[in-house]
Amino acid sequence: MAEFAMAENPNVSERLALDPGAKAEFYEEYRQLSPLGYANALRALLAMDHITDQLPRLRMPVLLIGGDRDPSLGPMKVIHRKIRGSKLVVLSPASHFANRDQPDAWNRLVLDFLARVEKKG
Protein backbone atom coordinates (compact mmCIF):
# COMPACT_ATOMS: atom_id res chain seq x y z
CA MET A 1 0.00 0.00 0.00
CA ALA A 2 2.87 2.38 0.75
CA GLU A 3 4.34 1.78 -2.72
CA PHE A 4 0.97 2.54 -4.31
CA ALA A 5 0.54 5.73 -2.25
CA MET A 6 4.04 6.95 -3.07
CA ALA A 7 3.43 6.42 -6.78
CA GLU A 8 -0.23 7.42 -7.11
CA ASN A 9 -1.27 9.65 -4.22
CA PRO A 10 -0.35 13.26 -5.11
CA ASN A 11 -0.30 14.20 -1.42
CA VAL A 12 2.47 11.69 -0.82
CA SER A 13 4.33 12.09 -4.13
CA GLU A 14 4.62 15.88 -3.66
CA ARG A 15 6.14 15.32 -0.21
CA LEU A 16 8.64 12.90 -1.74
CA ALA A 17 9.46 15.39 -4.51
CA LEU A 18 10.46 17.90 -1.82
CA ASP A 19 12.19 15.34 0.40
CA PRO A 20 13.06 11.99 -1.22
CA GLY A 21 14.40 10.87 2.15
CA ALA A 22 10.84 10.81 3.49
CA LYS A 23 10.30 7.42 1.84
CA ALA A 24 11.30 5.56 5.02
CA GLU A 25 8.85 7.74 6.96
CA PHE A 26 5.98 6.64 4.71
CA TYR A 27 6.93 2.97 4.93
CA GLU A 28 6.84 3.21 8.71
CA GLU A 29 3.52 5.07 8.76
CA TYR A 30 1.83 2.60 6.44
CA ARG A 31 3.16 -0.31 8.52
CA GLN A 32 1.37 1.16 11.54
CA LEU A 33 -1.99 1.73 9.82
CA SER A 34 -4.85 -0.46 10.85
CA PRO A 35 -7.25 -1.40 8.04
CA LEU A 36 -10.22 -0.20 10.10
CA GLY A 37 -8.56 3.13 10.91
CA TYR A 38 -7.64 3.71 7.28
CA ALA A 39 -11.16 2.83 6.12
CA ASN A 40 -12.65 5.27 8.65
CA ALA A 41 -10.30 8.02 7.48
CA LEU A 42 -11.47 7.45 3.90
CA ARG A 43 -15.11 7.54 5.03
CA ALA A 44 -14.49 10.90 6.72
CA LEU A 45 -12.97 12.29 3.51
CA LEU A 46 -16.00 11.14 1.52
CA ALA A 47 -18.33 12.82 4.01
CA MET A 48 -16.59 16.20 3.62
CA ASP A 49 -18.68 17.10 0.58
CA HIS A 50 -21.79 16.74 2.71
CA ILE A 51 -20.72 19.24 5.37
CA THR A 52 -19.39 22.06 3.18
CA ASP A 53 -22.70 23.93 3.35
CA GLN A 54 -22.48 23.88 7.17
CA LEU A 55 -19.09 25.62 7.30
CA PRO A 56 -20.53 29.18 7.34
CA ARG A 57 -22.17 28.34 10.69
CA LEU A 58 -18.80 28.04 12.43
CA ARG A 59 -18.19 30.83 14.91
CA MET A 60 -14.75 30.04 16.26
CA PRO A 61 -11.24 30.97 15.19
CA VAL A 62 -10.05 28.80 12.29
CA LEU A 63 -6.51 28.59 10.95
CA LEU A 64 -5.85 26.69 7.73
CA ILE A 65 -2.25 25.95 6.80
CA GLY A 66 -1.45 24.44 3.44
CA GLY A 67 1.45 23.96 1.15
CA ASP A 68 1.89 25.53 -2.28
CA ARG A 69 2.28 21.99 -3.68
CA ASP A 70 -0.63 20.51 -1.72
CA PRO A 71 -3.29 18.93 -3.96
CA SER A 72 -5.78 19.78 -1.18
CA LEU A 73 -5.09 23.51 -1.46
CA GLY A 74 -8.12 24.05 -3.74
CA PRO A 75 -10.59 22.56 -1.25
CA MET A 76 -8.81 24.40 1.55
CA LYS A 77 -9.44 27.70 -0.26
CA VAL A 78 -13.14 26.79 -0.51
CA ILE A 79 -13.22 26.09 3.23
CA HIS A 80 -11.47 29.43 3.87
CA ARG A 81 -14.05 31.33 1.79
CA LYS A 82 -16.94 29.64 3.59
CA ILE A 83 -15.75 30.26 7.17
CA ARG A 84 -16.04 33.93 8.00
CA GLY A 85 -12.89 35.26 9.65
CA SER A 86 -10.80 32.18 8.96
CA LYS A 87 -7.15 32.60 8.13
CA LEU A 88 -5.41 30.70 5.33
CA VAL A 89 -1.63 30.57 5.14
CA VAL A 90 0.19 28.84 2.29
CA LEU A 91 3.74 27.75 3.01
CA SER A 92 6.32 27.35 0.25
CA PRO A 93 7.84 25.07 -0.69
CA ALA A 94 5.49 22.65 1.01
CA SER A 95 3.32 19.66 0.20
CA HIS A 96 0.23 18.22 1.89
CA PHE A 97 2.58 17.63 4.82
CA ALA A 98 3.48 21.29 5.34
CA ASN A 99 4.16 20.61 9.02
CA ARG A 100 7.01 18.32 7.93
CA ASP A 101 8.23 20.38 4.99
CA GLN A 102 8.30 23.68 6.90
CA PRO A 103 8.19 22.67 10.59
CA ASP A 104 9.54 25.92 12.03
CA ALA A 105 7.15 28.12 10.05
CA TRP A 106 4.22 25.77 10.70
CA ASN A 107 4.88 25.66 14.45
CA ARG A 108 5.28 29.44 14.63
CA LEU A 109 1.96 29.97 12.82
CA VAL A 110 0.11 27.56 15.10
CA LEU A 111 1.63 28.93 18.31
CA ASP A 112 0.92 32.55 17.27
CA PHE A 113 -2.65 31.61 16.37
CA LEU A 114 -3.21 29.85 19.69
CA ALA A 115 -1.71 32.79 21.62
CA ARG A 116 -4.09 35.21 19.84
CA VAL A 117 -7.07 32.95 20.53
CA GLU A 118 -6.12 32.58 24.18
CA LYS A 119 -5.66 36.34 24.53
CA LYS A 120 -9.16 37.00 23.12
CA GLY A 121 -10.74 34.26 25.25
Image (cartoon, helix red, strand yellow):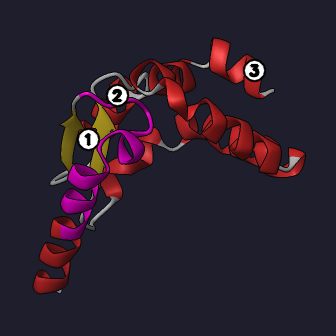
Q: Earlier in the sequence, mark 2 or mark 3?
A: 3
Query: Which SS class for mark 2?
Result: helix
The answer to whether 43 appears left or right of 66 in the picture is right
Residue 45, horizontal then vertical, whole percent: 62, 38
Residue located 29% across and 48% down the image? 64
- Residue 3, label in figure: 3
Residue 116 image-quadrant placement: bottom left
Stretch in magenta: 93-111
Q: Amino acid at mark 2?
A: Leu
Count of picture labels: 3
Q: Which residue is mark 1?
A: 80
Amino acid under label 1? His
Numbered badge on residue 73 = 2
> Which element carries disc 3, helix, strand or loop?
helix
Q: Is residue 121 above or below residue 105?
A: below
- Image point 15% across, 67% down: which residue? 112
Looking at the picture, how far across and down is residue 102, in whole percent?
Answer: 29, 43
2, above or below 113, in the image: above
Quarter that holds the C terminus: bottom left
